[in-house]
Image (spheres, grey):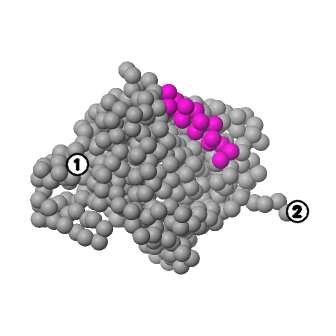
Amino acid sequence: MKKLKFPSAQTLLFIIAGLVALLTWVVPAGKYDSLSYNASSQTFTKTSLDNTFELPATTETLNNLGIKIPLEKFTSGAIYKPIGIPHSYKALPANSQGFFDLVKAPIKGIIEAADIIFLILIIGGLIGIMNLTGAFDAGIAWTAKILKGKEYLLIILVTTIIALGGTTFGLAEETMAFYPILIPVFLAAKYDAIVGVSCIFLGSAIGTMCSTVNPFSTIIASDAAGINWTTGLQNRLIMLVLCLSITIIYILRYAKRVKNNPSKSIIYNQKEDIEARFKIKTNSYTKFSGRLKAITFVFSASFVVMIIGVSFLDWWFIEMTTTFLISAIIIGVLAKIKEKIFIESFVKGAADLLSVAFIVGIARGVTILMQDGLISDTLLFHASTITEGMPKALFTNFMLFIYAGLSFFMPSSSGMAVLTMPVMAPLADTVNLGREVIVNTYQYGMGLLYLISPTGLILAALAIVNIGFNKWLKFVPPLLIILTLTTMAFLSLSVYL
């Protein structure tokens, strides 16, 4: 009998989409009313089933709706998405998703995720141009020489820097740009691709899980819970240091085993293929000339500009994508690449990441099925009705797992915050806890499942390196268990301190 193979990322997502479609036939449909603020008319819009009402934007309106969020959070733009109105859940006629809904979902997802898809494709084109110049080969050889004997510093630095990006401004989708660049560096340092993927993906995951000032999770969730975002900051800082340290030690232990004995690598049978994919040469003597250094500087500067733009200038995908396109053009000019060759190399580089772009779109399609099937709010409603009267420690851990489960179906951190916080935050009042506990369990729960959730970014990250999801599931579970137990213990202790 032929040995069964683990399905590809795209096939796995289609299977998950099929299961979600089946859920819409089983789980009752329902929805919370929502409230949004209109800056132009300075009014609230309440959406209820098929009706829409204009309401005065006053504290009295919020009080009447049972929303414990200060009015200025809406008027200042801190809360810019519609929020769920507590105690407004209503059962709806089923909107079960059939075969045609299922096959249309990936297309809808690709269209909805067009911003990140174009970012990925333009980055692919930029990588294609960089490969053509030879700057990568020279830069990697130079880096390997500098780090010789101290390669472990690469793991610590990359993981820590990306985690800092995650905890401050939610560095997540943007990390797609780093895999094609950094994986060759890790390979040149005699590690395997799993080490490189781990430093980037887990760094981002831990950073966003323990967000401190991240506007897309901590701040928007705190605002939606009706508290100041600094409340609970100390605990989140402790968790960041604790979880990041555990993660770095975990990666270092695996990396040391692989470096000492390459056959210990989980992906040892793919070693030659992956090195060929990233054009890793065992002996690279390309001179790192002044021209190649200038090209590498422009390439690196594009990421610095992207981070500054996202952090301080309200940039998003259009501006980020434009930055990388301009960078590719400047590099083409510096390298004196002919126009025809430039276009061919750029298109080929983009094509190399096309499968990754499709994975992102298909994953978004799973979320669309949930929304169209009207079952997301039903899951939230039932999750919020079973916690009253629980002991504090049990309550916090129960909320941790509720958020972990919900994040599979709602992977957007900002979407999860505005949808769930107005409903979940008041539950803390019933067990005499501060609402920051709900904000923290929301972050930790989402972050923990993110490590293995196929509806997140892990499949896209693995696809860049051509590593199967089954290989990741061999590597990450022990770390996930350690982090889960650590989080549970910390939450249990924190509610009594």
Q: Does any portion of residue 323 appear in the rendered image?
A: no
The dot on residue 66 is: 1
User: Amino acid under label 1?
Assistant: Gly
64 vs 417, nearest the viewer: 64
Toward the viewer: 351 or 213? 213
> Residue 274 location in percent, x, y?
68, 55
Estimate the x, y position of residue 70 in percent, counting from the top left. Answer: 18, 45
Residue 27 on the magenta span: no
Q: Position of residue 273 (x, y in %)?
A: 71, 57
State which mark lies toward you, 2 or 1. Answer: 1
Report the number of numbered marks. 2
Residue at left offset 64%, top offset 48%: 472
Reply above or below: 434 against 220.
above
- Left or right of 480 in this view: 315: left
Name the residue located 40 percent from the left edge and 46 percent from the top edge: 384
Q: Residue at x 58, y 39 (%)?
A: 480
Residue at 47% x, 51% y: name it: 406
Quarter of the image with the C terminus is: top left
Q: Tag 1 or tag 2, which sits nearer the N-term?
A: 2
Q: In the image shown, does 32 or 149 lie closer to the viewer?
A: 32
Q: Which residues are magenta?
A: 473-491
The residue furthest right is 1
Q: Which residue corresponds to mark 2?
A: 1
Percent across and percent down for residue 434 are 31, 32
* Image quarter hosting the N terminus: bottom right
Q: Residues within 10 Å of mark 1 (few under 14, many from 20)?
A: some
| Label 2 packing within 10 angstroms: few (<14), some (14-19), many (20+) | few
The one nearer the camera, 53 or 282, is 53
